[in-house]
Amino acid sequence: MDEPIKKAVAIKYNKEEDDAPKVVAKGKNLIAEKIGKIAKENDIYIKKNANLANELYKLNINEEIPEELYEAVAKILIYIYNLKHE
């Protein structure tokens, strides 16, 4: 059985500058691991969600997420906001 492909997608959202969150980095396997390592080193929250990662991975770097992914991404952003303000 083949190992599943690991994917990582980094998103950024600045409510003063952006209309919607956008993809700022993405990669598979070794690059995905590097993205995760950089995130951990910089205390950036990591949320594991294979389905969402697969959808976000289809986007280009600096591309805003489409409306159909707003709800899923919003849940993550709300969770992060609450963690930061505990």
Image (spheres, rainbow, N blue to C red):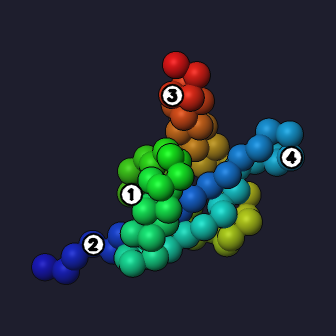
Q: Which residue is mark 2?
A: 4
Between tags 4 and 2, which lies in front? 4
Rounded to the nearest angstrom, the CA distance separating label 4 from label 1 is: 28 Å
- What amino acid is at disc 4? Glu
Identify the residue at horizontal 80%, vertical 39% (top origin).
Answer: 15
Rounded to the nearest angstrom, the CA distance separating label 1 from label 3 is: 22 Å
- What amino acid is at disc 3? Leu
Quarter of the rendering occupied by the N terminus: bottom left
Residue 10 x, y percent position in the rendering: 57, 59
Identify the residue at horizontal 27%, vertical 72% (top origin).
Answer: 4
Q: Which residue is mark 4?
A: 17
Residue 83 circle label? 3
Residue 50 circle label? 1
Residue 46 x, y percent position in the rendering: 45, 49
Mark 3 vs 2, N-terminal side? 2
**Quadrant in the picture for residue 29:** bottom left
Mark 4 vs 3, N-terminal side? 4
Residue 19 circle label? none
Q: Residues within 10 Å of mark 2 (few under 14, many from 20)?
A: few
Q: Residue furthest right?
A: 17
Rounded to the nearest angstrom, the CA distance separating label 4 from label 3 is: 22 Å
Between tags 4 and 3, which lies in front? 3
- What amino acid is at disc 1? Ala
